[in-house]
Image (cartoon, rainbow, N blue to C red):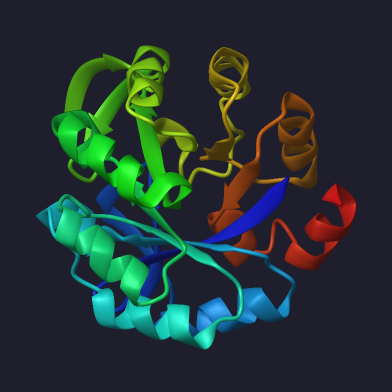
Amino acid sequence: MEIIPAIDIRNGNCVRLYQGDYGIETIFSDDPVEMAMEWQSLGAMRLHIVDLDGAASGELCNLDIITEIANALLIPVQVGGGIRQMGTIEELLKVGVDRVILGTAAVEDAELVKEACRRFGQSIIISLDAREGYLATHGWRQETELKAVEFVRSMAKLGVRRFIYTDISRDGTLTEPNFSAIFELVDTIRFPVVASGGISSLIHLKVLKKLGVAGAIVGKALYTKQINLKQALAAIS
């Protein structure tokens, strides 16, 4: 299981939100590139980058910073936030991004997902951002009536082979992951599922590993030092 540090970019800063609320923001660094280098130096094997400005606006806003991170690191990065056109996917892969994450676009444009999977295979990840079991889109601001498990099945038919599940109500809260929802997904689809939201201890990581997730995205717990990345990597390996 990969432990994947998260770098959320907003207004050029490395930040964390509380339950996806843009009004409750903590700035942890004014240099996302330096932060990325630090996680790599501590042993991270992959980074998760979210363009929060892009997620809210509907188009990628921090391509320059993302490009700089991708070029500076020796480890792969995956990027999400405001990616809703084929041209944006192509641009990100061209600048060195390893995997591109689709959230809102996956809900609203099945043809884009199908074509992206056909062209780029496992470089495409679908993000399942759920609040009380139902997916939310547009930077987590719009509710839908789609249930995560049902949506996953429809995505798998389009060729998607990798998913990220985030429980919005737990994201940035340092409580605990939604283990039951994560297990339901892992058990249902048999494709790699990466868990996100509420991970705040070594125990949480060990439970997620037992549940069979492919990776765990950790944000606030790393920045507040509730989880030590080096220790976590050693414990999980």
Count of all numbered marks drawn on residues in the image: 0
Q: Which of these two is toward me, 133 or 152?
A: 152
Up/down of 77 relative to 63, above or below: above
Q: Position of residue 120 (x, y in %)?
A: 37, 51
Q: Position of residue 100 (x, y in %)?
A: 37, 55
Taking the image as shown, residue 36 lies to the left or right of residue 66, namely right
Q: Position of residue 235 (x, y in %)?
A: 88, 52
Instruction: Give me the residue at 22% from left, 54% from top.
Output: 83
Q: Specify whether residue 141 is in view.
A: no
Q: Specify whether residue 103 is in view.
A: yes
Instruction: Give me the residue at 73% from left, 64% from top.
Output: 229
Taking the image as shown, residue 223 lies to the left or right of residue 55, namely right
Instruction: Give me the residue at 36% from left, 21% from top.
Output: 157
Instruction: Give me the residue at 53% from left, 77% from top.
Output: 36
Q: Which of these two is toward me, 73 or 223?
A: 73
Taking the image as shown, residue 200 lies to the left or right of residue 198, namely right
Q: Position of residue 164 (x, y in %)?
A: 47, 38
Taking the image as shown, residue 31 lies to the left or right of residue 191, namely left
